[in-house]
Image (cartoon, helix red, strand yellow):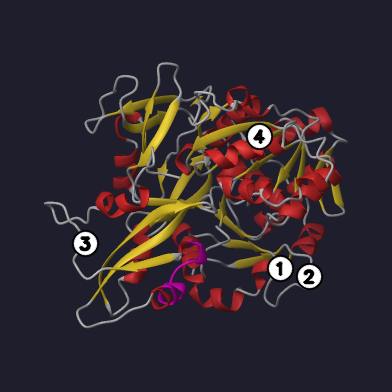
């Protein structure tokens, strides 16, 4: 399977159809492919070779889509950087991946002075914004104008298509290696679930670096539909884009849907074109889901469950199961067409239906492994199955229900926050004896990051001091939203490990599952 084949098909069947819309910019599929071939030529002139990594740090735009396809056309691998990371975290992913080229837009050009001294691998910075090109950067449009188109490098199959960094239990992000097979196979699974065709108009409102949105990036192209992008999620911006560009499909994380349905603005826009909305990346609060169903009666809702390591889709909950009071409404759906799912016990033995265990999956969508981390790869992919770290069960009809997470991970607003990263920052405070970071229920974010801190004897700390201390070390979305203090030691197991299940109990009491 070849990522660029999805583009060539779009040109074959819809050459003069609209490929991208961003503000007042519109381009056909023929024009899009021409620009992609020129971008690949430009990358080759910058000595980007097969499987070399090319990174991007940018808000959503039509040029973000050109980046994905231009990198693939050149035979290289993409590295979309999480826009919410702090400069040291960004620098780590760029250096760990050895990305030689970085694409940057207006929103992040102001970060360059802080970022440049931290970088060792990046040789060229390409500015893809619309403002003045920063000093020392290459202007994107000038670069395309000066470069000749080159033939497709025909990278595909097991060739590395991209590195996608996700939180790591060691405190460092792990680069998930996805091949062309992984990404295109996932797109084939997304097509029937979302019902894309050449009449589809898809809105990129969730961040384009995130695989929740990327699940449709290649599927919409494969279907020769239209990509509409807004820079970032904003309630009025999204509603206006749906009305103005006659959007038919989109993917939003539950936090965004919550803001949308509680905005009081839905009735102010013509959303008659909108047909299907997929949600995923974090559990959907049932109250928010029911409100969305009530306020968007003409829109079919679908859920996708997965993770970066699965490129990302594992299961789908189809629109026909989105019925208030329905027995399957709180499930994560059934395995995607090309994916097998199994629930296992701690010895990796399959459990009977209804029994709770770890959710495992396999299929051509499952990653090649973690970049440079052979031991962690072997552990996660043991026995030929992706071990998700999520705890759940499968009912008699094949629907998967998620009840907890085995990994110390919090999903807040659709972003993964590994507690060990936050704890690592807190432990750097000289007044902290020990700490545990957990996810607590949040109406706004699904889960919020909460820190339980034991100060050193004689030390008095405040929540504000802990949060401000962390702000200098980790990204804003990882910061504790609340902090509680205790004088007695945290509960530990016989092996001396902090029992987070005990720490979490008071916050999740009375709830049917330990995720939100």
Q: Earlier in the sequence, mark 3 or mark 1?
A: 1
Q: Find out whether the residues at labels 2 and 3 contact each other: C-beta distance under 8 Å.
A: no
Main SS category, magenta section: helix
Q: Is residue 142 above or below residue 333?
A: below
Q: CA distance from mark 2 to mark 4?
A: 40 Å
Does dot 1 land on a helix, a strand or a loop? helix
Q: Does 429 sit left or right of 22 as displayed?
A: left
Q: Nearer the observer, disc 4 or disc 3?
A: 4
Q: Find out whether the residues at labels 1 and 4 contact each other: C-beta distance under 8 Å.
A: no
Read off the residue under disc 3: 490
Magenta stretch containing residue 453, yes or no?
no
Residue 34 seen in render: no
Read off the residue under disc 2: 131
Does dot 4 land on a helix, a strand or a loop? helix
Q: Find out whether the residues at labels 3 and 1 contact each other: C-beta distance under 8 Å.
A: no
Q: Find out whether the residues at labels 2 and 4 contact each other: C-beta distance under 8 Å.
A: no
Q: Find out whether the residues at labels 1 and 2 contact each other: C-beta distance under 8 Å.
A: yes
Q: Earlier in the sequence, mark 4 or mark 3?
A: 4
Chain part drawn in magenta: 467-477
Q: CA distance from mark 2 to mark 3?
A: 52 Å
Which quarter of the rendering shows the N terminus?
Answer: top right
* Residue visible at 48% across and 43% down in the picture: 308
Read off the residue under disc 4: 293
Q: Does 362 sit left or right of 135 as displayed?
A: left
Q: Nearer the observer, disc 3 or disc 1?
A: 3
* Residue visible at 77% across and 36% down in the picture: 274
Read off the residue under disc 1: 106
Q: CA distance from mark 4 to mark 3?
A: 42 Å
Q: Nearer the observer, disc 2 or disc 3?
A: 3
């Amino acid at each position: 399977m070849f990522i660029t084949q999805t583009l060539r098909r779009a040109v074959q069947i819809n050459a003069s159809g609209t490929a991208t819309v961003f503000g007042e910019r519109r381009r056909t599929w023929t024009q899009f492919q021409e620009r992609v071939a020129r971008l690949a030529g430009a990358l080759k002139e910058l000595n980007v070779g097969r499987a070399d990594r090319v990174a991007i740090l940018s808000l959503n735009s039509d040029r973000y889509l050109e980046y994905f396809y231009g990198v693939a056309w050149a035979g290289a691998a993409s590295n979309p950087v999480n826009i919410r990371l702090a400069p040291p975290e960004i620098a780590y992913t760029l250096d760990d991946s050895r990305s030689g080229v970085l694409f940057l837009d207006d929103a992040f050009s102001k970060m360059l002075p802080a970022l440049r001294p931290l970088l060792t691998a990046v040789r060229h910075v390409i500015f893809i914004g619309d403002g003045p090109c920063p000093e020392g950067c290459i202007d994107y449009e000038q670069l395309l104008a000066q470069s000749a188109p080159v033939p497709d490098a025909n990278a595909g199959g097991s060739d590395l298509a991209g590195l996608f960094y996700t939180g790591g239990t060691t405190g460092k992000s792990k680069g998930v290696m996805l091949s062309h097979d992984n990404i295109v196979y996932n797109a084939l699974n997304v097509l029937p679930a979302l019902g894309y065709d050449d009449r589809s108009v898809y809105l990129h409102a969730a961040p384009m670096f995130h695989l929740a949105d990327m699940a449709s990036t290649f599927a919409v192209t494969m279907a020769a539909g239209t990509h509409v992008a807004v820079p970032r999620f904003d309630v009025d911006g999204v509603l206006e884009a749906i009305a103005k560009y006659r959007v038919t499909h989109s993917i939003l994380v539950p936090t965004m849907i919550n803001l949308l349905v509680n905005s009081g603005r839905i009735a102010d826009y013509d959303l008659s074109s909108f047909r299907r909305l997929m949600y995923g990346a974090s559990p959907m609060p049932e109250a928010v889901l029911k409100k969305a169903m009530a306020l968007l009666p003409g829109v079919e809702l679908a859920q996708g469950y997965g993770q970066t390591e699965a490129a990302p889709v594992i299961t789908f909950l189809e629109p026909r199961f989105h019925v208030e009071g329905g027995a399957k409404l709180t499930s994560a759906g059934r395995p995607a067409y090309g994916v097998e799912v199994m629930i296992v016990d701690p010895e990796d033995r399959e459990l009977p239906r209804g029994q709770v265990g770890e959710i495992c999956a396999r299929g051509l969508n499952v990653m090649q492994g973690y970049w440079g981390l052979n031991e962690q790869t072997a552990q996660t992919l043991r026995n030929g199955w992706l071990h998700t770290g999520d705890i759940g069960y499968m009912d008699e009809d094949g629907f998967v229900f998620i009840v907890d997470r085995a990994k110390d991970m919090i999903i807040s607003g659709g972003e993964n926050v590994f507690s060990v990263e936050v704890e690592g920052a807190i432990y750097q405070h000289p007044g902290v004896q020990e700490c545990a970071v957990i996810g607590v229920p949040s109406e706004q974010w699904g889960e919020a990051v909460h820190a339980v801190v034991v100060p050193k004897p004689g030390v008095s700390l405040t929540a504000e001091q802990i949060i401000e201390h962390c702000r200098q070390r980790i990204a804003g979305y990882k910061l504790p939203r609340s902090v509680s203090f205790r004088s007695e030691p945290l509960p530990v197991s016989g092996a001396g490990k902090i029992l987070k299940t005990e720490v979490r109990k008071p916050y999740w009491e009375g709830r049917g599952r330990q995720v939100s």
